[in-house]
Amino acid sequence: MKLLFHLGRYSRLLAKVFAKPEKKRIYFRQFLIELDRLGLDSVGIVFIISIFMGAVITIQTGLNLENPFIPLYLIGYGTRDSMILEFSSTIVSLILAGKVGSNIASEIGTMRVTEQIDALEIMGVNSASYLILPKILAAVFINPFLVILSIFIGIWGGWLGGCVLTDVLTTDAYIVGLRYAFVPFYITYSLFKTVVFAFIITSVSAYMGYFTEGGALEVGRSSTKAVVYSSVLILMFNLILTQLLLA
Amino acid sequence: MIEVRNIYKSFDEVEVLKDISVVFEQGKTNLIIGQSGSGKTVLLKSIVGLHEIDQGEILYGDRNFSAMNFRARKVIRQEIGMVFQGGALFDSATVEENVMYPLDMFTDQSTEEKLERANFCLKRVNIENANDKYPSELSGGMRKRVAIARAISLNPKYLFCDEPNSGLDPKTSILIDNLIKEITEEFQTTTIVNTHDMNSVMEIGDKVVFIYKGVKCWEGSSQDIFDSDNRELNSFVFASKLTKKIKNIQP
């Protein structure tokens, strides 16, 4: 029953979010602000995670390849596809669920408990749309770029970890692997997943924040719930989308 | 003028407002007083539509606010200015941006015009040279004054203040009270102030409505309070030694 209640309330909130904006110019200004806060502010963490992920994938694959008949360039191939298919889209989205999700839930939650949302409503502003729509659009727009960046950085990190810092394989072999059996649809699949995950992160976190009741403690709880529910939903949708798009 | 007719409001089977009817007049400072938990904030929030009432009618002039949908209410809401208990200023915006926000959202004025209006409102509440400050950098009294400036930026017909003096020292409270009173008279707004500050009642209360356990228990002017024999009102108003003394020295 509680699940149905939340689903119903979430759907009603989304209907309110996607209502016609009062003033498009102001919404566009908010959209640009959110691009900066949700997207550009996340470049640093995406960079760090991706470089280490790429390096670790390469080193671990290399260390576990014991059969001399398996060519070493497959390590590069494995790193590339791991980054494209799973690590960049799913893991980066999970990390962003933690960073961006908690940020959104606590920001909107604080606005709720300090009556800032009531102030917007009193003025006749559709608070749900004004606060949430620019965040959803900004994340849906910018997250695919973050994932593309993550793929490149991850592959570069793989080269750094496997070819420069250790002698797992040569640079030539790594490059051959990167170019081996490339499936362009994997990029489409990865970006499509990212868009869905971006929507989940922003809308679920905003939902948690928007319906916060109480004080600082409840804002903290909403923030935690936002991260937990977004992460679980990302993992669930990862399975569903993989089955639908790749199986 | 705002008229409230026989309104009822419950939360989870608990009846918070019971059959309240009252008229709030234009150009006057109407006060809603009562103990904490008596239902005065619920009444105020019901009047502005933040809570949906279960029964009854709320009329803004001759417009039935309670029967309107969200779109129709938007027209009235742009005639409303509200000062919340904590100010409810937007944390991420500066003082100037806070005051300009309603103008940005609902007018097509140029930036210069909006800035001029914002500066006029800030000057009206005696705030100068604080345009670029953020709410976190302001004192409680300044925050309330900026909230008032934001509330009057669109020239509202209706002004609502939810406990405007809470957390303020007596001197700043009087400043805020006087400001509300002056703005009410200057802009001829229908002003409703929710308070339990007896100083405010005596200073600015043109009309006072006393809510007791969700029921309108008494109404009259601030002077009528001294002559009233309403037991609940007397026990609320003259609860402190100071107010008891004041009552005794009244002619």
Image: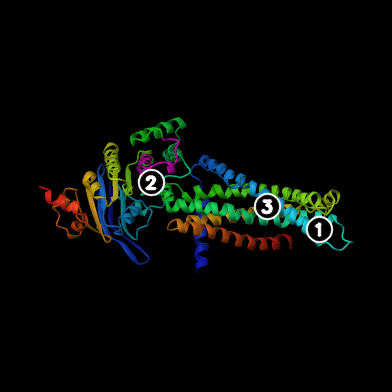
**Label 2's element?**
loop
Circle 1 — which element? helix
Give the residue type at disc 3: Ile
> In this rendering, does residue A144 appear at all?
no
- Name the amino acid, label 2: Gly
In this rendering, would A119 be left or right of A97?
left
The residue at which mark 3 appears reads as A49
The residue closer to the viewer here, B207 or A229, is A229
Q: Please, which chain is the residue tagged with disc 1 on?
A: A
| Mark 1 or mark 3, earlier in chain | 3
* Distance of label 3 from label 2 (alpha carbons): 41 Å
Task: Say whether mark 2 and mark 3 are on the same chain.
Answer: no
Q: Measure how far apart labels 1 and 3 are at the Cα level.
A: 20 Å
The extreme left residue here reads B251
Main structural element of the magenta stretch: helix, strand or loop? helix
Classify B68 as above or below B143. Answer: below
Magenta includes B135?
yes
Q: Residues within 10 Å of mark 1 (few under 14, many from 20)?
A: many
Task: Determine the residue positioned at 42% across, 51% down.
Answer: A114
Label disc, if present, on residue B87 of the rendered structure: 2
* Residue type indicated by callout 1: Gly
Q: Which residue is mark 1?
A: A62
Residue drawn at (67%, 56%) of the image: A91
Query: Magenta part of the protein: which range?
Result: B130-149
